[in-house]
Amino acid sequence: MTVELSRPTYGSDLTIWMMRQMGIPYIALNTGSSFKWLQDSMVNYAGNNPEIIQCTHEEIAVAVAHAYAKATGKPMVAAAHNVVGLQHATMAIYNAFTDRAPVIVIGGTGPMDATTRRPGIDWLHTALVQGNLVRGFVKWDDQPSSVAALPDSFLRGYQTAMMHPQGPVYICYDATYQAELVGEKLELPILDRYPMPTSPGPDPDAIRTLAAWLVEAENPLVVADHVGNNPQAVDALIELAELLALPVADRGGRYNFPTTHPLNVTGQELEMMKDRDFVLALESRDVYGLFHQRGLHYWQTEPFIPPSCKVASISLWDMRGGGWNQDYQRLAPLDLNIVASTTVTLPMLVEECRKLLGNRSKTRYERRARAVGQMHLAAKERWQQQAREGWNASPISTGRLATEIWDGIKNEDWVLGNGGLAGWPHRLWDFTKPYQYLGGSGGGGLGYGFAASMGAALANRGTDRVIINLQSDGDLMYTPGALWTAAHHKLPVLTVMFNNRNLFNSDEHARIVATQRSRPVENRGVGVWMDDPPIDFAKLAEAQGVFGIGPVTKPEQIAQALKEAMRVVQQERLPALVDVVCQVR
């Protein structure tokens, strides 16, 4: 039971009081002197509620909050120590921004009054204005200039982060106001009078037009990317697909569509686009990229769809603003662009399609459903066969590793907190619930993975769900201290290393350039491969209190290693890591 807080005494108490009123459960941080007053308030005023999640690096702290927000739909707080901590946090803040995740980052600075600064360190750790550092990739930032301004600042930051399209915000607290007395005359806000803004809905005429196109289309395709930001939108998408026998491709920004559904054509959408007469893109961060391909070795783009194909989009991504980073992507030609929430729009679209269908014959849709279902089954069978290629190879094939993991978890309640394992889980595993997949980092920055799995574990505390982290080797080496946080807070994460001893993306680029220039391809490993010496991830884990097994080099060893790790995770409720040496791809 949450204990009601007494009236705040100091500015730092007031900030924590606001967090508590807004239901913030956790604060991830790497401690710093610029928010020592806030830390005192967390522990001694609020009784460690919100709970401090102690991290060894600010990038880890923000990534934990990033994944937690995706798993729950609600923000947690990450704290970054003045100028230096914020610079460490920038990569993770950028990831959250490009992934549109509602993260509240706070920090300290100053004192801004130069006459009260300590010689040396306070000057080095004070900026004018600190938010300038991240303003290009946050939705909003603030540095309140009085104790009285603290509640409004945090409330606005919370609402801004949560409004769609969502994203991170940054609030910087002057050391002076953290330490200052609140005073009896300050009126505390009544939070019921500050409701969250509702999600924007669509133009009714646009819904009617879109419904008519969907009902009449002969060869439609739906491509979903971030629909799963809200599970209700996923339910509406399933209903729409089943109503009109629409094939759906899931681009994986979130969980968007069950992998077991017979209308799921994920992995086949590029080939299908060649003969489509209508494509509907849902919450796509890059509509142009859906229909155009650029290879690694040339600059020109080639369209997938025929010129006669109609294209419509429902999304809030056009509202995201910004400009420092070009993550808004290239404009795509569209026949209909509905700027609205899919959570609001898809149920309306379903009802409008039902009206148009009326009593007309369903034969065309039933025929299409059978054809798409056969395509779905054929792909599943093909992937099962491909997974068995190189079944007994060493290093271990990714197809076999994905199969072995699935065999170990398929009867459990599980969550894939991080990792893609070269796409194999989505080919072989049954994703049937929105909470089972959170999506990737958003910005592509390394160092996200292990911290994200911890965010998923925090979001699922109090359940028996198995949190799975398919951890790339290069990614973990950016933030290896995340292992200690998992051990310290007893977060039961099952980490399986996708350890190919290689930074594969760079390897692929180096191979292509060398081939183009008729230079030795075998030299591509210089500066790329991580095998001299090979990293012993089991020992790295054990050194920080995480149960470790490996390196596993023979495929027949995988099942037993996973069984031992699962015992630690499920019975002892502690983190475990299995280091598996894999093929490059």
Image: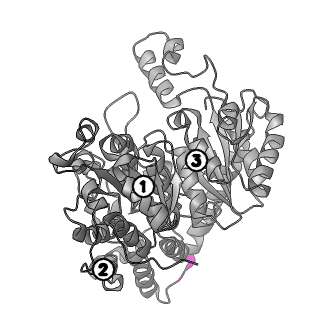
Residue 6's spot in the image, x, y percent? 43, 78
- Give the residue pinned by disc 3: 485
Image quarter in which the C terminus is found? top right
- In the rendered view, would you say 547 is above or below 468? above
Q: Which residues are magenta?
A: 360-364
Helix, strand, or loop for circle 2? loop
Q: Is residue 217 left or right of residue 411?
A: left
Counting residues from the N terminus, which is met first, the one under dot 1 or under dot 2?
1
The answer to if 363 sits in the magenta stretch is yes
- Most prominent secondary structure in the magenta stretch? loop
Helix, strand, or loop for circle 3? helix
The answer to if 150 sits in the magenta stretch is no
Q: Is residue 177 left or right of residue 546?
A: left
- Give the residue pinned by disc 1: 78
Q: Nearer the viewer, residue 214 or 257?
A: 257
Q: Nearer the viewer, residue 471 or 376?
A: 471
Counting residues from the N terminus, which is met first, the one under dot 3 or under dot 1?
1
Q: Which mark is residue 208?
A: none
- Give the residue pinned by disc 2: 188
